[in-house]
Image (tube, rainbow, N blue to C red):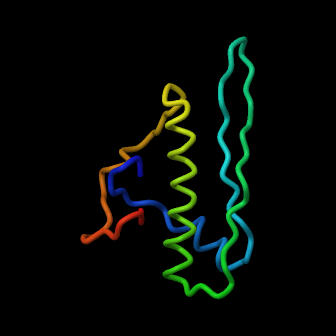
Amino acid sequence: FLGRPASVFRGPAYFAWRTGVPLLPCAIVREEGGRHHVHLREAVWPDPDWDEETAVRELSRRHVDSLADFIRKRPEQYFWVHRRWKTRPPEPVEEGIP
């Protein structure tokens, strides 16, 4: 996540895979004058041929990549309420996998 290994919650990816529904990356951006805009990205669909491990890894990676892209475009809007890098995935981490 943002160039550093970070653990992510598996729940959204797992439920998307189990139910066959997509993840919908989105962000709310504050604009001047107290207005907000919701930015939606293309839905991230699970592949029905994936096994659980592949599905959770791929869906999580795509979700986190989308979140990181929003943050890079508007870093002043980024606010996270817990320590994102407090825990890290077990080593070794494969390239490009959160």
Which of 52/58 is in front? 58
Residue 30 vs 13, above or below: the answer is above
Which of the 4 image quadrants contains residue 88?
Answer: bottom left
Question: In x, y percent, where is residue 63?
Answer: 57, 58
Q: Residue furthest top?
A: 33
Is residue 6 toward the left or the right of residue 90 in the image? right
Residue drawn at (66%, 74%) of the image: 46
Question: In x, y percent, where is residue 15?
Answer: 64, 72
Residue 1 vs 7, above or below: the answer is above
Question: In x, y percent, where is residue 97?
Answer: 42, 66
Residue drawn at (53%, 64%) of the image: 60
Residue 34 vs 17, above or below: the answer is above
Q: Residue furthest left?
A: 91
Residue drawn at (45%, 39%) of the image: 81
In this rendering, the count of numbered labels is 0
Is residue 91 toward the left or the right of residue 16 in the image? left
Question: In x, y percent, where is residue 51?
Answer: 56, 87
Which of the 4 image quadrants contains residue 6?
Answer: bottom left
Image quarter of the C terminus: bottom left
Residue 79 vs 7, above or below: the answer is above
Is residue 10 toward the left or the right of residue 48 in the image? left
Residue drawn at (49%, 81%) of the image: 53
